[in-house]
Image: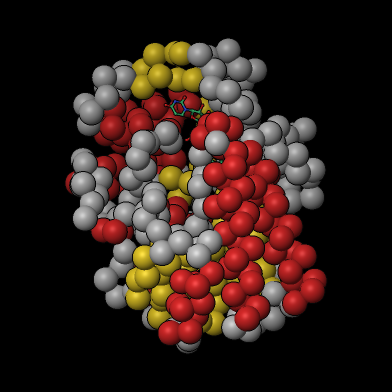
Amino acid sequence: MSVLVLGGAGYIGSHAVYQLIDKGESVVIVDNLETGQRKAVHPEAHFYEGDVRDIYFLRSVFQKEQIDDVIHFAANSLVGESMKHPLKYFDNNVHGTQVLLQVMIEYGVKNIVFSSTAAVYGEPESVPITEEMPTVPTSTYGETKLIMEKLIKRTDEAHGINYVSLRYFNVAGARETGDIGEDHRPETHLVPIILQTALGQRSHITIFGGDYDTPDGTCIRDYVHVEDLIDAHLLALDYLRHGGKSNVFNLGSNQGFSVKEMIDAARTVTGREIPANIGDRRAGDPSILIAGSSKAKRVLGWKPSRTSVAKIIEDAWKWHSSHPNGYGKGE
Ligand code: UFG
């Protein structure tokens, strides 16, 4: 009886594995280590290095292990890169999910919790964004995640695969112990870049655009603590195990913070200066993204308890200041 975590060596996947093992679950990880880190793999998980698109490899894992449920994080997830290399995204994200579903059907595995994104909504007509709003992705990344959702839905209709799609807003923070955290290469995300600047690893942070139609002119995002986000995955797994119907949920905090507010919050938490300059806008950035997450609270009983900007930055700072080079060079 194991949970298969695809992408379990990545930032969000590794936090899921740690929480599953804390709860006494047996965990199998599949990760090709393209963006995942070997050192983020929990020592008690059964780790298989390989690619989700490799059907022979994936079958061999399902053959060896007793897989009951799947949590699927394995995907490329950079908006900018997806615009330059769309086929890489269709291949890894969409084709990878097709192969995974095929093998799940072959082995009679029914439950999947799927890592989706707010990028499926594109530029929203209004905020907060609720699950019923139109999905019009502006990036190839968002498009592939929406197609992955549809693939899973159609497979459910034909083969009775039960799914929960979780649409993440801006995930940040780290496990409270500081053992694991965010380490992307190259790093593009706001909170780690702010904290690398606080550590003196960057001379300054460039704020992408100061002329948005927001109170201080910088983009507003909805930040959710990675550990709260993973709580929702565990609740979703429980929901499916107890016969819950296939469903889609937003995961955010219902609150927006501007880039400037995030930098100010980090100055308070770290006591460091954090020089910041205003630069050009980044292509594809919507001005405001705020989640309506009441459905996840109502249906799954999700109670985010760590999702304040101060707590997110404190926990991220614990990780970055104790691991200034992230996981190091790797193995
Ligand atoms: N930003 C800066 N300077 C930087 C980095 C980021 O000003 O050096 C700004 C961005 O312009 C944006 C905000 O900080 O306004 C957050 O940027 P991130 O790159 O951290 O996150 P995104 O909002 O672009 O994207 C995140 C996830 C995506 C997901 C999206 C959904 O990384 O995978 O949320 O909303 F699709």
Query: Which residue is drawn at the image coordinates 57% and 59% (left, top)?
Result: 96
Residue in front for this viewpoint, 89 or 113: 89
Residue 282 at x, y percent in the picture = 53, 22
Residue 228 versus residue 169 in the image, above or below:
below
Q: Quadrant of residue 193?
A: top left
Q: In the picture provided, is 80 more to the left or to the right than 172?
A: right
Q: In the picture provided, is 292 more to the left or to the right than 170?
A: right
Residue 110 at x, y percent in the picture = 64, 79
Residue 293 versus residue 263 in the image, above or below:
below
Query: Which residue is drawn at the image coordinates 70% and 64% (left, top)?
Result: 152
Query: Which residue is drawn at the image coordinates 76% and 44% (left, top)?
Result: 135
Residue in front for this viewpoint, 179 or 160: 160
Image mark count = 0
Q: Residue furthest front?
A: 56
Residue 148 versus residue 265 in the image, above or below:
below
Residue 160 versus residue 282 in the image, above or below:
below
Residue in front for this viewpoint, 229 or 48: 48
Residue in front for this viewpoint, 160 or 121: 160
Query: Which residue is drawn at the image coordinates 23% and 51% (left, top)?
Result: 330
Quarter of the figure with the C terminus: bottom left
Residue 123 at x, y percent in the picture = 70, 32
